[in-house]
Every structure is written in C-alpha cells, then in structure tokens.
Amino acid sequence: MEIDKRSGCPINLSLEVLGDKWSLIVIRDMMFGNRRHFRDLLTHSEERIASNILAARLKHLLSIGLITKRDDPSHSQKAIYSLTEPSIQLLPILAMIGGWGRKHLPVTPELSIRAELLEDGGPIMWEEFMNELREIHITNPIGGTNGQVASSVLARLTAAYIQTCERMEES
Amino acid sequence: MEIDKRSGCPINLSLEVLGDKWSLIVIRDMMFGNRRHFRDLLTHSEERIASNILAARLKHLLSIGLITKRDDPSHSQKAIYSLTEPSIQLLPILAMIGGWGRKHLPVTPELSIRAELLEDGGPIMWEEFMNELREIHITNPIGGTNGQVASSVLARLTAAYIQTCERMEES
DNA sequence: AGCAACCAGTTGCAATATGCAATTGGTAGG
DNA sequence: CCTACCAATTGCATATTGCAACTGGTTGCT
C-alpha cells in the first residue's frame, strides 16, 4: 500500500492513513449502518464499492489497527469486522464532515437524515454514541452483530437510514 | 478529474471532493502557513508536492469553489490564491483531524505544535481564527499576502510552525 | 446425497492517477 | 543582456482504481 512518511505532521499522517475515497466510507458503514460482514459492506452500501477494493481497504484498516477481524461463531467462514477505539474516535470527525457536506455540497435530502441527526445531537450525543459503539464493537463484538442491541442512539440513526436505503433500492 | 456522484450522502460527497492525499494538504498550508502563491505552496511545504500535482489540485479546488485566484498587483504573472467561506469552514475539521492524528499516529513532536495549539484553543479559538481568515482571504485578499497582518491567532500559530520548518530545512 | 444460494475474497485487465525530472514562455531587477 | 524567478506543462514510469468474472469453500434445503 502506502508507507511514504511524507512528513510527521499530524494532519498529513492522518491523510496518509485515511485520505482516500473508500476508507472512511467503510468506517461510516460499520459505524452508522452497523455493517459487520464483508457481504453487508459490499452490497448494502449506497456507493457500490467493488469487492477487490473492499478487500484491500479492510486489509489496510486491519493492518493499521482501525478495525479488528473475528470469526463469526454462527458461520465458519463468516468474519465479523469491528471498530477499535481509534476508529470510534473518528466519529466526531465524520459527523463534522457530514455537516460540512450538507452545507456546501449538493446532497440528497434523504441521505442527509443521518448527518442532520448527528449535527443536531452535538458533542453530547456523539459521546453517547461512542459509548454505544464501544459496547457493540469492543466489549461485546459478537453479540452486537444482530439486532438485540438496545442502544438508543444507534437505533435512532440506523432506523432512519436503513429505511431510506431500502426505499431507494426498490425504486 | 472526478465527478462520479456515487451517492448523495454528505460524507460521501465530501470525500469525493476532499478525499485524496493532497487537497487538504494544500488547504492546510494556505490556512495555517499563510501560503498564497504557487511557489510558496510548492517549496515551503514539508511534504514536497510535485508541481504538476499542485497545479492539478489548485485547478480542482478552484473549480469547486474552495479557493479563488487573483492577479498579484506587485508582479504581473504572480497569482494569489485565497480561501473561500466553504474552505474556511473546514478549519474545525482540520483541527480535529490533527488532534486525532496526534493521538493515534506516530507524529513528529515539532510538527505537532500547530495541532496542539489548535486543540488546546478549542472551538472558541477556532471561531476567532476563522474570523481572521475571513479578513485575510475574503475581505482583504491582496493586502493579507505579506506580513502586515495583525492577527494574533494566525501569528501565534504560524510563528511556531514556520520556525520549526526553517529549523528542519537547515538540518 | 445433491444442489442452489451464500461466504470471503482473488484474478486479469483496462482506465486513471500519481510521482519525477526536465522544460516552457514569460517577467523582474540589476 | 543576463540571471533569477514565475506559474505552470510535458513526457514517461509506476501505482492505484474500477469492473467483471471466477475461486474454493460452507450452509441449508429437499
């Protein structure tokens, strides 16, 4: 991949790690769409990522510790990808990037719901959400896969989002 | 360049516009290093961007309205690049990206000074800084080029930064 | 047992983007 | 007139992305 080390500037290093068109999309889907399997990330995303690129991104994110990979006990060849503390701490940045895009770019209203909720919620909601993510991805990464999560913020966000996605897939 | 429109999601659109390895670096140098000319951006940056790539990025940023270009009255073929309101509003995001990198990546302490000051300053300082940027880049884009700016925040930030850069160029 | 559907990827190949060095046409100052 | 500087551009090698088809394996159903 890329291990240039162009400079040790924090912004530059962050960009060397996350500054491409797909890494943050993958993290976004894991974070807000609760997508934890290869197939989920591949097919249920708006942007139709190609399988080889998804594989490369996951490998890369894995190698720098932004996600982890576990076997899914329910299916011998299924893998569960989880966020880690560093990637969970990207939440405020993703929230602000969404807010910026919503303000300055030609976004689709339906797909902006998530960004809008996050923006309205502010730092307090972000903290709450991050705690839920820690629970789901770090404390109990296996159980969090299916729907038994009682997390209110994630539930609120994904409900609106998944509904929209499915509505758009039909049409 | 790229006008895919993979989806209208705010995060995705932002990434389509800024999700590469150089665009935010250029904005960073204009914003925090007060670099307004091609030559400045080309040679006085840590990461040694190539001239063709810098030209392509500037053209791209220009085309989407994140920067503007004016003739420099002091030199007929010199151009002054300025930030616009949308790119000035990227400041909090750059500040947070810097903070994240500082926390999770192997940054160089000297080059982290800027990110540290920004982080410590918090949203209040960001507002102040953004107002200074509006003054320098929008209200009075020509005069702001050389050193007569009395802006305290920018002065504080760039002083530490430029000093470091020069120290490193010597060695 | 047999078969279709699903699983996480991999492969080959074309299209794009990036990185580097050299060069361009023009201006400024001495 | 000559050197230094200006904002790029060109040609060419390498790296990354994007697309479609395919792999080897597992699961659930009948």
Image: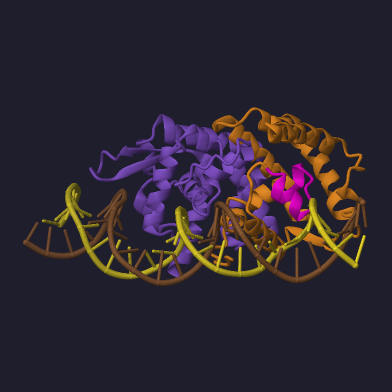
Chain colours: A orange, B purple, C yellow, D brown
**Residue at 73% over, 58% down:** A66
**Residue at 67% over, 52% down:** B100
- From the viewer's perspective, tell me whether residue A23 is left or right of residue B43: right
Queried whether the magenta region covers residue A32, the answer comes back as yes
Q: Is residue B11 above or below residue A37?
A: above
Q: Is residue B129 above or below residue A85?
A: above
A150 and A128: which one is in front? A150
One can see residue A124 in this view = no
- From the viewer's perspective, tell me whether residue A8 is left or right of residue A135: left
Q: Is residue A168 above or below residue B37?
A: above
- From the viewer's perspective, tell me whether residue B20 is left or right of residue A149: left
Magenta residues?
A30-45
One can see residue A2 in this view = yes
Image position, residue B54 (x, y; %): 40, 53
**Residue at 60% over, 63% down:** B108
Image position, residue A82 (x, y; %): 80, 55
**Residue at 51% over, 38% down:** B87
Queried whether the magenta region covers residue A146, the answer comes back as no
- From the viewer's perspective, tell me whether residue A56 is left or right of residue B156: right
Image position, residue A22 (x, y; %): 62, 51
Image position, residue A36 (x, y; %): 79, 51
> Residue A128's quadrant in the figure?
top right
